[in-house]
Amino acid sequence: MKKRIGCYPRVRVEGCSRGVVSQAGAVLLVETVRRCGLDTAISAALAPWRKPRAVHDPGQILLDVALAVALGGDCLSDVGMLRSEPDVFGTVASDPTVSRLIATLARSGPKALAAIRSARAEVRERVWQLAGTRSSAADGQATVDIDGVLVIAHSEKQDAAPTWKKSFGHHPLLAFVDHGQQGSGEPVAALLRAGNAGSNTVADHIEAARIALAQLPRLLRRGRQTLIRTDSGGGTHEFVNWLSTPGRWLSYSVGMTITDAIHQAVLTVPASVWTPAIEPDGQVRDGAWVAELAGDVLKGRPSGMRLIVRKERPHPGAQLRFTDVDGNRLTCFATNTAEGVMAELELRHRRRARCEDRIRTARATGLRNLPLHDFAQNQLWLEIVSLALDLLAWMPMLALTGAARRWEVKKLRLRLFSTAGQLVTTGRRCRLRLAHTWPWTDVITDALDRLQILPNPG
């Protein structure tokens, strides 16, 4: 009888083996790229930057970096994890080739960014058509959330500056299409800004909104089928006026700062006018009430704008403000939606908080740090991060069902992408075999079956 020492079995490790593939679950992302036509679209968009006799296609190089970021990479050299698995990811460019391409595209400035964004918009429309009722605009409506994020710089980078939170770095402005409770969100705008950029800069919000709208199918840009949501950072007269411009036909739900005029108007609201706020399940939200403001507080505002205020008992330990009324915290937002119950409109605006989840996902997908020095190169890095986030949103939309579709990126990497496999060649075909002991092998194989039945692009 042998006596075991320790809790785990001893395993002899050998450094050389054939046919073993790490990150085998990443074939889900590769198949998503193939079925939605992202590889051909990016290659066509970046064709002007391909040099004669070049071995590597610029579009594939950029897409390889995006795949590496989607798998957890946070710098250009992490593309090496794909280079080590040529049977799954094909031929991958060397690190110097990747760096030269990024430098070349960065020198092209807006032209290269426009080409990449145009390809993404083209593919996004196809993905939403393939998804059908599972797409984020299945009901003919799209919701775009705009918010800023602080990216800390730990070294000297171009335009890195002290931020409003006393840190040091950059202050990008991001926009995401909300998938609702059944999914995550897609990035549709990523505008890099200096660290000292303001939270409520009108020109930046307008530029981010323009970039986001260009990513949506043309049918959603008219008839108020697109809702723009922001926090109080977007609650400026100029931005609301831009959203309300005749002919733009956008819906908006924009947080507003509690000014003295709004505070005085809240004090005149009778107690009988306040109605209870509601929860997502339709139940009454305990300790929260909403009311609509009217009168002089709307003077000078765009026609059709409604000002809705909520008062709520702050949670224990919350710091009170001078604008609080009778110990209740006040928040306010503006909207041009004429239909709908006031409590439902307030709930719709409160759901803007899901954008914080999208930002957390972006931080875990290459946005925790900007790895390059030049501002133009880091702007290009934001486009790479957006490509990675697109893939992480499109794959669950097209292939996963049930609770798996709502898995966040860390869970996708742990349960699906990190799966190991074995490449076996039989009948002149290369097959990837996954371990039957892995609890989520069935999830991977079922997802691949759903992707493979989709029609080929073109």
Image: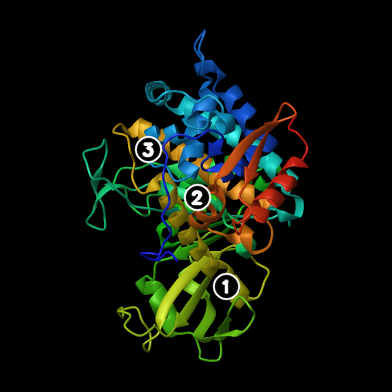
Residues packed near mark 1 inside 10 Å, few (<14), some (14 to 19) or many (20 plus): some
Q: CA distance from mark 1 to mark 3?
A: 39 Å
Q: Residue 145 at what x, y percent from top left?
A: 52, 55
Q: Return the residue found at the far front.
A: 1
Instruction: From the image, state whether disc 1 or disc 3 is nearer to you.
Output: 3
**Between 274 and 416, which is closer to the camera in this rendering?**
416
What element does badge 1 sit on? helix
Residue tagged 2: 175
Q: Is residue 128 left or right of residue 277?
A: right
Q: Is residue 452 left or right of residue 212?
A: right
Pointers 2 and 1 in contact (CB under 8 A)? no
Q: Residue 378 at what x, y percent from top left?
A: 36, 36
**Between 12 and 412, which is closer to the camera in this rendering?**
12
* Residue at x 38%, y 33% (from the top left corner): 77
> What's the mark number on residue 347?
1
Residue tagged 3: 75
Q: Residue flagged by tag 3: what amino acid is it?
A: Cys
